[in-house]
Amino acid sequence: MVYELRTYTAVPGRLPELLHRFQTITLGLWEQHGIRPVGFWTVVIGESNLRLYYMLAWDSLAEREVKWTRFMSDPEWLSRRAETERDGPLVASFANTILEPTAFSPMS
């Protein structure tokens, strides 16, 4: 099992719209594509309260490649994302990291 930690920095003032998009659009499409979220977090105290952190679980990097590619090219996702960004992008920047649990991790 590998985990993907993704960090999105929202455009100032647009984090609520980004969260709404995940809750009402993205999660349903991920379910259709077999993408498994582990959790979502926003910052209460820290470097930036414009950030959304979330983690996805993958059986392998090969699974990630297939499912993420399908999701990112899904016509419904492309259309719905465009609708939510008609007034400009919601995300200013993003980063992702692929993580593997250590032998002593409760997740291993």
Image: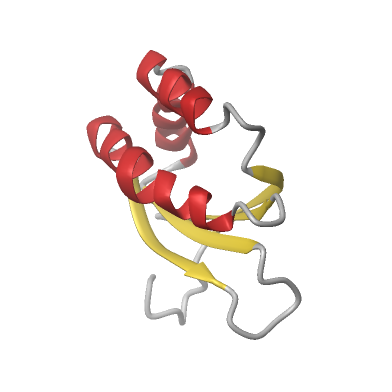
Up the image or down, 56 lies above or below 89; here it is below
Residue extending farthest bottom: 45
Q: Quadrant of residue 44?
A: bottom right
Q: Is residue 7 above or below residue 93?
A: below
Callout count: 0
**Relative to the observer, which residue lies in front, 48 or 72?**
48
State the image coordinates of residue 25 (x, y, percent, origin top left): 34, 38
Here the colouring is secondary structure
Q: Quick check: 106 above or below 55?
A: below
The one nearer the camera, 73 or 76, is 76
Q: Tell me which corner region of the image, top left, top right, bottom left or bottom right, holds residue 64.
A: top left
Residue extending farthest to the top is 75
| Rendered image quadrant of residue 91 | top right
Q: Position of residue 23 (x, y in %)?
A: 34, 50
Residue under the image location 67 percent in, 63 percent down = 50
Q: Quadrant of the N terminus?
A: bottom left
- Residue 35 visible? The answer is no
State the residue at coordinates (46%, 54%): 19
Q: Quadrant of the C terminus?
A: bottom left
Q: Position of residue 30 (x, y in %)?
A: 32, 38
Residue 58 position in % (x across, y down): 39, 47
65 lies above or below 5: above
Q: As drawn, is 74 to the left or to the right of 17? A: left
Query: Can residue 9 be spotted in the picture?
Result: yes
